[in-house]
Image (cartoon, grey):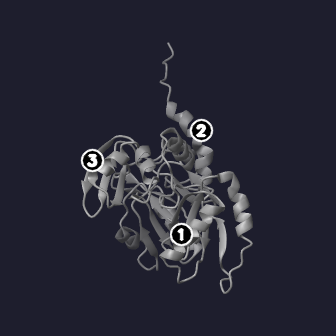
Amino acid sequence: MQKRTRYDATIDRRIKYIEQIIQSNVKYVQYKNIDSDLLNFPNINYIRDTSVVYCKTQCSKRQLLDYISKFGEYESIRQYEEYEITFKNIQDADLCAISSNEFFLFKKVFIFTSFDILKELAIKKKIPVNGFYNENLPLDYYKLIIGPLENDTNEIRFNLLKKSLNDISPLFGLKRCINKLYVAVIFKEQPLVERIVEVLSKIKIKNNEKFSIKFAYENCLITDIPEIFNIPFVSSMEPTRVVFLFNANVPKSFILDNFPNENLQIVTLKYLTLIKCSTLELSAQIYDKFGGLGYYESTIISGYFPEFNFEIGDY
């Protein structure tokens, strides 16, 4: 009698996403090929603080609790220099994070939920998204980068910029990049964005020939597969001089121990490590060395990050 084999549902899941995973150009096995990608998905680490939102406010704790009750259930709220709110699920936390107004300013380390789902949730729960105050942006193909701005752009002029952009089309959110001469912007009405870029790209600023408005993720892929990866991420479809690592808390010392004689620029974020290299050859070595490498009980995942975004601090 023929033995009946158990159906493995993960095979269908792998086949469903394998094309996108290959296009994302990430490496999570030591010897990378299509078969190894398909058969050896990484063990994904649980990551902490995914549902934590921080809030600055002059209002009372009771007023804050009344306001956040509309987003969903929360597990705890603690008060330090600012409030720390832990929600029961990520989507509620992300929805809260994009709902800043003149009374409550929310901040979240990373937005896991896509723009489309956030917009849908906001409509369903009747949550107003005030793009003038929201600085928490999801990864999205319609995100724009504007800059460089003038060196003396103070808060008054910065708010004037926000108002001007909001007058063109309602803002979903806007934030300064690490390099404060650049800002990242998402508009609510995405079908209009290409036209907005076309019009604003014609603007010329005296003594600022480098000024431009462009899509943030040109020649990049946003991968958002929570069944397989523990964070959504953006990766360059072509090799760059910047490598990203995730799924393991890799310390800077571990990277430098493996490449002791190289001048590396390393940025350690909450869920991601970025490594800027001097050459493409070196970035390829780092990509190959760490992608698929076991680190304690984790498997490091490597990929290529867009250089422009790294340089302006859009991460």
Q: Nearer the viewer, mark 2 or mark 3?
A: 3
Q: Position of residue 77 (x, y in %)?
A: 27, 50
The numbered dot on residue 76 is: 3
**Disc 2: which residue:** 16
Q: Is residue 104 left or right of residue 186?
A: left
Q: Residues within 10 Å of mark 3 (few under 14, many from 20)?
A: few
Looking at the image, which is closer to me, 2 or 67? 67
| Number of numbered tags placed on the structure image | 3
Q: In what element is the residue under mark 2?
A: helix
Dividing the picture into quarters, in which one does residue 185 lie?
bottom right
Q: Residues within 10 Å of mark 1 (few under 14, many from 20)?
A: many
**Disc 1: which residue:** 242
Residue at mark 2 to residue at mark 3: CA–CA distance: 38 Å
Q: Residues within 10 Å of mark 2 (few under 14, many from 20)?
A: few
Q: In what element is the residue under mark 3?
A: strand
- Looking at the image, residue 309 lies above or below residue 120: below
Q: Amino acid at mark 3?
A: Ser
Q: Amino acid at mark 1?
A: Val
Q: Is residue 58 left or right of residue 192?
A: left
Is residue 179 visible to us here?
Answer: no
Q: In what element is the residue under mark 1?
A: strand
Looking at the image, which is closer to me, 248 or 95? 95
The numbered dot on residue 62 is: none
